[in-house]
Amino acid sequence: MTPNITAFERPPDRGKGHARDMRVRWALEEVGQPYNVRLVSFREMKKPAHLALHPFGQIPTYEEGDLALFETGAIIVHIAERHVGLLPDAGNARARAIAWMFAALNTVEPPIVEREAFMLLETDKSWYGERLRMLEDRVRVRLGQLSSRVGDIDWLDDAFSAGDLLMVTVLRRLNGSGILEEYPNLSAYVGRGEARPAYKRAFADQLAVFTDREPTG
Ligand SMILES: N[C@@H](CCC(=O)N[C@@H](CS)C(=O)NCC(=O)O)C(=O)O
């Protein structure tokens, strides 16, 4: 059965791959599962029909038969459980890969998103610069720890897994900040993720949502 996912009708990042449907697209591309995308507007996302799929009125959602899921971590676990390629079979390696999924979403993503939200919403504050430096230092703490752990290995735990897929999408959110480049091994790690053919297909499809809607000329 072909799953249906939702994505922004007008991606605020202009298709740079930061909207979280990118994670689901990438996972589906990695396992070779075709999917349909339904585009939703911000207004539609807050209406009852979408809230029935996603209680917080967000994207992405995932529908497959009578199953409706929200939360990218849960969606990717679901995909990984039904296909080969995103989680190792062996018990301990599988458990570690799932731990990295949680680490990406619960430990590394929050300070990165806090910095982003602050930069969007609080630019008019007199203490903007001071607080921004503090938030960036919090990001650096996590990146420093991750960088030490990653060292010079290709993926977080031997072979590429859903843990890497989520970690790469989380770290990419720092593009343009210059912070990721302070950790050359993490920068290279993100580059390895972005170089995967499945990533490139997902990225191109997400970008097309934006470019197809941009007026030409
Ligand atoms: N924890 C959720 C976060 C979902 C999320 O923040 N989605 C964003 C797009 S990337 C969204 O829909 N934002 C619009 C809003 O919150 O109104 C997940 O991982 O799926």
Image (spheres, rainbow, N blue to C red):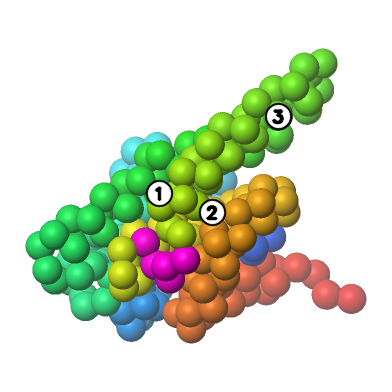
Say if 60 sits above or below 143 in the image: below
Q: Residue at x 54, y 78 (%)?
A: 195
Specify the label residue 133 is tagged with.
3
Residue span colored magenta:
152-156
Q: Residue 32, how many percent across, how many down?
A: 33, 83
The answer to whether one can see residue 5 in this image is no
Which residue occupies 38% across, 40% down?
Answer: 106
Residue at image mark 2 = 171
| Marked residue nearer the N-terminal end (3 or 2) | 3
Question: Quarter holding the C terminus?
Answer: bottom right
Q: Using the image, tell me which numbered label, if any, was put on residue 104.
A: 1
Q: Could you tell which of marks 2 and 1 lies nearer the N-terminus? A: 1
Outermost residue, right side? 217
**Residue 105's quadrant in the figure?**
top left
Please, what secondary structure does the residue beneath circle 1 have?
A: helix
Quarter of the image that includes the N terminus: bottom left
The residue sitting at the top extreme is: 126
Q: Nearer the viewer, residue 16 or 4?
A: 16
Please tell me whether the stretch drawn in magenta is mainly helix, strand or loop. Answer: loop
- Identify the mark nearer the N-term, 3 or 1: 1
Q: Is residue 84 above or below residue 132?
A: below
Lateral position of residue 103 relative to residue 87, left or right: right
Q: Is residue 83 above or below residue 66?
A: below
Left or right of residue 45: residue 86: left
- Is 95 above or below relative to 31? above
124 or 93: nearer the viewer: 93
Cα–Cα gap, marks 2 and 1: 9 Å
Cβ atoms under marks 3 and 2 closer than 8 Å: no
